[in-house]
Amino acid sequence: MTFSWYRWDVRHVTEADLRPFAPVFGALSREARPDDPVLTVASRLEGWRALNPGVHGLLWLARWGERPAGYATARINRNADTAEGQVMRAFLGIHPAFRRRGGGRALLGALTETAEEFGRGKLMGTTSDAVPEGAAFVRAVGARAVLEDRTEQLDLRSLDLPALQARLAQAPREGFTLGVWDGAYPEDHLAEIAELLNIETPRGNHPVARHHLTPQKLRALDQALAPRGTRRWTFYVRERRSGRLVGFTRITWQPQRPKWLNQGKTAVLPAYRRQGLGRWLKVTLLEKVRAELPQAQVIETSTATSNVPMLNLNRELGFRLSHSSTEWALEVARVR
């Protein structure tokens, strides 16, 4: 008996195609994130299809004989600039019952062939510390670790918001104003918003520069929000004297999963750090969530281990470690 697979464009795969693989998806999800709810097949398909404009999504469904046994995914950003244009983002997973039969290497072979087909010289993906076999596998095939991340969660049900507000009141911020954009960014401010969102945060020695945002790219990303059903709040700080945007944080969620929110990047321009602006942004976000999203229970965020100031702030706010992950880079030409 051997492994076989079929490659799909995520735009064309259906729930009926995926339903036999629900036990595979569930087993891999519970293994990596035992405390998190398992996505339904419909939600998983919706997530795979929720790609940014210009990103091509592929899916491999693998069987051992006739039995569903694993899957892989790939994302290819056709609009990427700088080093990102040489990368194919990938994931592969084999159900624990079917491991050590060559399935991982078979799917890796399919991924590397596809990377070459699209002119990508590097595969990048992540492993979770909850699944040490994942790290052992990618290390064995020649990948190298490029970034360590901590994914942390804040339980809103036990949040002591008054204590955080009292601490925030001690920080001087007379020279700044704070606002929020609900959903799409205002058209007449796209240039300065793009500059703000491009603020660099510590990422260790990551070999791929962050994707550089432009007003045109922001507009395309905004246009993709509604079809996905994604809600987004972006909080920003503006300096009164200069009128300059100097910091931001944002949160996204799916109305069909109202209990789970995701806090994305939080950043302040280097010249304005150590003034409590990041804390102000995050506490204001929590105030709005508490007031307007009563069903929300958990906020999740991921931070590079090299970004110590942000990790310290998250700890102060009550975030606790959910799991750690490692991002890996694998040169296609050097796959062992």
Image (cartoon, rainbow, N blue to C red):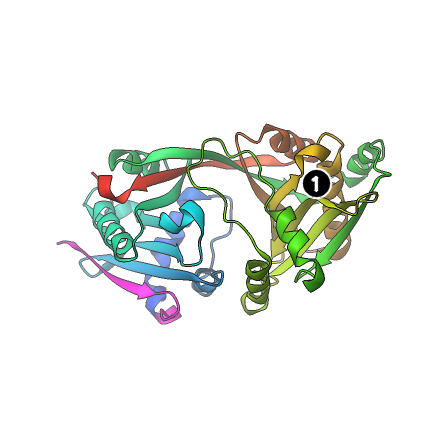
Quick check: can you spot residue 89? no
| Closer to us: 303 or 25 | 303
Q: Quadrant of the N terminus?
A: bottom left
Quick check: can you spot residue 48? yes
Position above or below: 217 against 128: below
Magenta span covers which residues?
1-16
Instruction: Say which residue appears at 40% left-offset and 53% top-offset.
Output: 26
Residue type, label 1: Ser
Instruction: Say which residue appears at 78% left-offset and 36% top-offset.
Output: 164
The reply to whether the magenta stretch includes residue 3 is yes
Q: On the rendered structure, is 92 left or right of 190? A: left
Q: Residues within 10 Å of mark 1 (few under 14, many from 20)?
A: few
Residue 75 percent across, percent down from the top left: 39, 55
Position above or below: 295 against 34: below
Residue at the extreme left of the image, as rendered:
1
Residue 90 percent across, percent down from the top left: 36, 50
Of helix, strand and loop, which one carries label 1?
helix
Residue 226 percent across, percent down from the top left: 59, 68
Tally the numbered discs: 1
The reply to whether the magenta stretch includes residue 119 is no
Mark 1 lies on residue: 158
Residue 224 percent across, percent down from the top left: 55, 65
Instruction: Say which residue appears at 65% left-offset and 55% top-offset.
Output: 191
Q: On the rendered structure, is 272 left or right of 331? A: right
Q: On the rendered structure, is 112 left or right of 310? A: left
